[in-house]
Amino acid sequence: MDSSSTATSRFSNGPIVEALGWLLPFALAVLGHAMASIKVGMPFIVDNARTDFAERTWYFMSGHAWLFAAYAMLLIGMSVLLRRLHCPGWVRLAVLCMAAIPAAWYFRESWYLFGKIIVMY
């Protein structure tokens, strides 16, 4: 094995790269929040209970923006803790998948708002 492939494998299996991977759910939630901010509060063609719930969720997260930072710190903390406990990779992946559920749900709600058709007067 040459030195370049050794350096590549060390880098790809390192804690920094893994911690950045753990931040993907956080990035997804922030992206969804930014996308929904474009259309939140506008008059929609179809305004139903789901739209109201998605808007209320967006307003709640806007008023409690510290939850995004707490979520990111929780993800990094779990990454570091599981790595220090020498958990196998499949355990870390399973925990990451479970920890990503809230971010995926919030992204889905935000995407719903972003995809709504607005009324143009």
Image: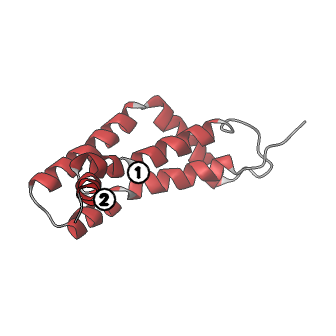
Is 8 displayed left or right of 121 in the figure?
left
Q: Position of residue 63 (x, y in %)?
A: 47, 29
Mark drawn on residue 25: 1
Q: Provide the residue designation for mark 2.
A: 96
Does the CB distance between marks 2 and 1 fall below 8 Å?
A: yes
Residue at image x 55%, y 55%? Answer: 108
Residue at image x 65%, y 48%? Answer: 113
Q: Is residue 30 above or below residue 13?
A: above
Residue at image x 48%, y 41%? Answer: 30
The one of 36 and 31 positioned closer to us in this rendering:
31
Quadrant where the N terminus lies?
bottom left
Q: Position of residue 104 (x, y in %)?
A: 46, 56
Tell me the element at label 1. Answer: helix
Is 32 displayed left or right of 85 in the figure?
right
Amino acid carrying label 1: it is Pro
Quadrant where the C terminus lies?
top right
Res. 57 in view: no
Q: Is residue 86 above or below residue 58?
A: below
The one of 30 and 48 positioned closer to us in this rendering:
30
Q: Earlier in the sequence, mark 2 or mark 1?
A: 1
Mark drawn on residue 43: none
Q: Position of residue 42 (x, y in %)?
A: 73, 37
Give the residue at the far left of this rendering: 85
Is 78 displayed left or right of 47 in the figure?
left
Res. 65 in view: yes
Amino acid carrying label 2: it is Leu
